[in-house]
Image (cartoon, grey):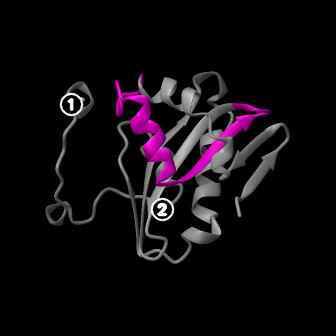
C-alpha cells in the first residue's frame, strides 16, 4: 500500500503509478550524477526501487529513490527538487518522509553519495564514511555514453 504525505497542495507519494518518467528523465539527464542517462534505464531504475515522488497538484517536482532489501540496508539515490521549488524546505520534508517510511525502519546501514548536499543529509544522521578503507566500488561514470 503506497504511503502519502501532504502539505497543502504538495504531496509526497510512494505510489509508482503517479511517477512521471518523462519528467524524471528530463531532470536526471541534465544532472551531474546521471547526465545523458537513457529513458529506458530511468524507467527500469524506478521499477526496482521504492520511489518517493514529490508533486505540486499533478506535476512531479521532485524525487527520492531508495534501493533496499528492506531488512538491513538502504541506498538513497536520485534525490532532487526542481530549482523553482527549492529553498522551501521540500528537500528536508522529502528526506523526513524517506527516513520515517515504515518499511525502512530498523535497517543496519543507510548510504548515499552527494557532491553538495552534505548539510541536508547530516540533519538525518548521515556522516562521512567512518572506515573508508573498508569500502570499495566499481565506478563507471561514462556508461551512458556507451549505450
- What is the x, y in percent for residue 86? 62, 29
| Res 97 → quadrant | bottom right
Image: 54 above or below 47: above
The part of the chain drawn in magenta is 30-59
| Res 54 → quadrant | top right
In magenta segment, residue 123: no
* Crowd class of label 1 (few under 14; some 14 to 19; many from 20; radius 10 Å): few
- What is the x, y in percent for residue 68? 44, 64
- What is the x, y in percent for residue 5? 76, 53
Q: Which residue is mark 1?
A: 142
Image: 26 above or below 15: above
The circle drawn on residue 125 is 2
Indicate which label's residue lies in the foreground, 2 or 1: 1
* Crowd class of label 2 (few under 14; some 14 to 19; many from 20; radius 10 Å): few
* The residue positioned farthest toward the right in the image shown: 8
In magenta segment, residue 58: yes
| Res 116 → quadrant | top left
Q: Quadrant of the image for the N terminus?
A: bottom right
Which of these two is toward me, 29 or 118?
29
Amino acid at each position: 500500500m503506497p504511503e502519502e504525505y501532504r502539505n497543502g497542495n504538495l504531496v509526497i507519494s510512494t505510489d509508482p503509478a503517479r511517477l512521471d518518467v518523462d519528467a524524471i528523465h528530463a531532470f536526471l539527464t541534465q544532472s551531474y550524477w546521471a547526465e545523458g542517462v537513457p529513458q529506458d534505464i530511468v524507467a527500469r531504475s524506478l521499477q526496482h526501487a521504492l520511489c518517493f515522488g514529490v508533486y505540486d497538484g499533478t506535476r512531479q517536482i521532485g524525487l527520492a529513490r531508495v534501493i533496499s532489501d528492506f531488512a538491513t540496508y538502504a541506498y538513497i539515490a536520485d534525490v532532487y527538487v526542481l530549482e523553482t521549488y527549492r529553498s522551501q524546505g521540500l528537500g528536508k520534508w522529502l528526506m523526513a518522509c524517506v527516513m520515517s517510511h515504515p518499511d525502512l525502519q530498523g535497517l543496519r546501514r543507510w548510504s548515499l553519495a552527494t557532491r553538495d548536499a552534505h548539510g541536508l543529509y547530516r540533519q538525518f544522521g548521515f556522516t562521512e564514511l567512518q572506515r573508508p578503507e573498508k569500502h570499495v566500488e566499481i565506478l563507471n561514470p561514462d556508461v551512458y555514453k556507451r549505450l
